[in-house]
Image (tube, grey):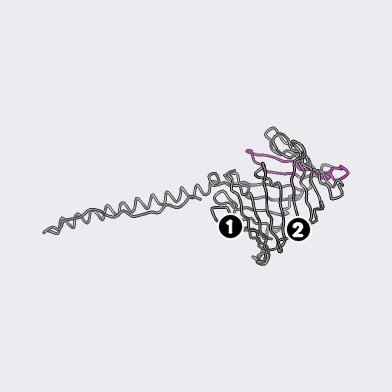
């Protein structure tokens, strides 16, 4: 965040010689007072302009838009640490090669490993404390690095689900499909764009009947500020709202079909944005969980 400028008043440096008549002194003093008053007014106007400029920068979401990549995450409930996650990165600075999850006794309880199988294929495995595979994904990406297919297997190598993604000529997600382990289509989503932004997602059943849809709203800087879910009869099901400041998210709110607040998350940043505290509250303000993250900060 840009630092606020310190506004200092100019000190008069002129030395006035005592005179036998007081009229010239009074005139000089009046001139100085008028000059100082004018200077103060100009500085006040400049300060307001500077504050407006800072606020515009703060609202622009351009200069201060950042991406946080976690290095370590501490989870707390009722003020007590419940788990600690440690992230390790390789060539891909955004997707960790390894995530180690420890309990309060610093014992490894879960491990997530992401490894390359082929040039465009990777495997993401979830293992328990004894190094047994709980489940794993086989992920295939296109030339642009976006996921084309994702296969989910259980620990016995049985195929559980398949996800497929199609993209338009601009590289945006056009359609997403999910199948069961027998490769039978379960549902699919179709994405609609306006002014380059995904404004609507329609979700269909396997036989092509609309089941629900999602409407996305953005601010002037392209931040997704509201996601609304509706059933096929246009009844509101749920709403997710996000509040941004300085290009960073500061609050998320989750509402039900009656628009009543179900829960919300507040974000606090410190140490030049390298520390992030996510605190989750119930709708009535009761603290549910805290996540303390140590991060690397990247420009988007």
* Quadrant the C terminus occupies: top right
Residue 117 sits in quarter = top right
Q: Is residue 187 magenta?
A: yes
Q: Earlier in the sequence, mark 1 or mark 2?
A: 2
Residue 268 sits in quarter = bottom right
* On screen, residue 183 above or below 24: above
* On screen, residue 78 above or below 28: below
Q: In front: 234, or 116?
A: 116
Density class for disc 2 (Cα within 10 Å; few <14, some 14-19, many ≥20) is: some
Image point (39%, 49%), residue name: 46
Pointer 1 residue: 268
In x, y percent, where is residue 218? 62, 46
**From which residue to which does the magenta span run?**
178-202
Cα–Cα span, label 1 and label 2:
28 Å
Pointer 2 residue: 109
Q: In front: 185, or 118?
A: 118
In x, y percent, where is residue 6? 40, 54
Density class for disc 1 (Cα within 10 Å; few <14, some 14-19, many ≥20) is: some
- The mark closer to the camera, 1 or 2, is 2
Q: Does the magenta stretch include residue 179?
A: yes
Residue 267 sits in quarter = bottom right
In x, y percent, where is residue 160? 85, 47
Q: In front: 255, or 182?
A: 182
In x, y percent, where is residue 75? 67, 60
């Amino acid at each position: 965040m840009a630092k606020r400028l310190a506004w200092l008043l100019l000190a008069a440096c002129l030395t006035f010689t005592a005179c036998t008549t007081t009229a010239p002194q009074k005139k000089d003093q009046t001139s100085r007072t008028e000059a100082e008053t004018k200077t103060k007014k100009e500085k006040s106007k400049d300060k307001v302009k500077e504050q407006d400029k800072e606020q515009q920068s703060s609202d622009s979401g351009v200069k201060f838009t950042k991406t946080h990549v976690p290095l370590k995450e501490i989870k707390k409930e009722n003020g007590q640490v419940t788990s600690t996650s440690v992230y390790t990165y390789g060539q891909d600075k955004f997707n960790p090669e390894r995530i180690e999850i420890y309990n309060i006794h610093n014992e490894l309880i879960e491990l997530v490993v992401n490894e390359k199988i082929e040039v465009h294929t990777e495997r993401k495995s979830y293992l328990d404390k004894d190094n047994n595979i709980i489940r794993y994904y086989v992920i295939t990406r296109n030339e642009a690095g976006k996921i084309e297919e994702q296969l989910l297997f259980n620990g016995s190598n049985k195929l559980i689900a398949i996800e497929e993604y199609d993209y338009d000529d601009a590289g945006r997600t056009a359609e997403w499909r999910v199948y069961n382990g027998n490769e039978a289509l379960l549902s699919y989503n179709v994405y609609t764009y306006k002014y380059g932004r995904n404004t609507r997602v329609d979700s269909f059943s396997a036989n092509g009947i609309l089941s629900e849809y999602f409407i996305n709203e953005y601010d002037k800087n392209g931040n997704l500020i509201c996601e609304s879910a509706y059933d096929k009869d246009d009844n509101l099901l749920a709403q997710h709202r996000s509040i941004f400041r300085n290009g960073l998210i500061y609050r998320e709110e989750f509402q039900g079909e009656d628009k009543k607040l179900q829960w919300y998350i507040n974000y606090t940043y410190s140490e030049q944005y390298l520390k992030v505290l996510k605190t989750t509250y119930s709708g009535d303000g009761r603290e549910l969980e805290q996540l303390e993250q140590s991060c690397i900060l990247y420009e988007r």
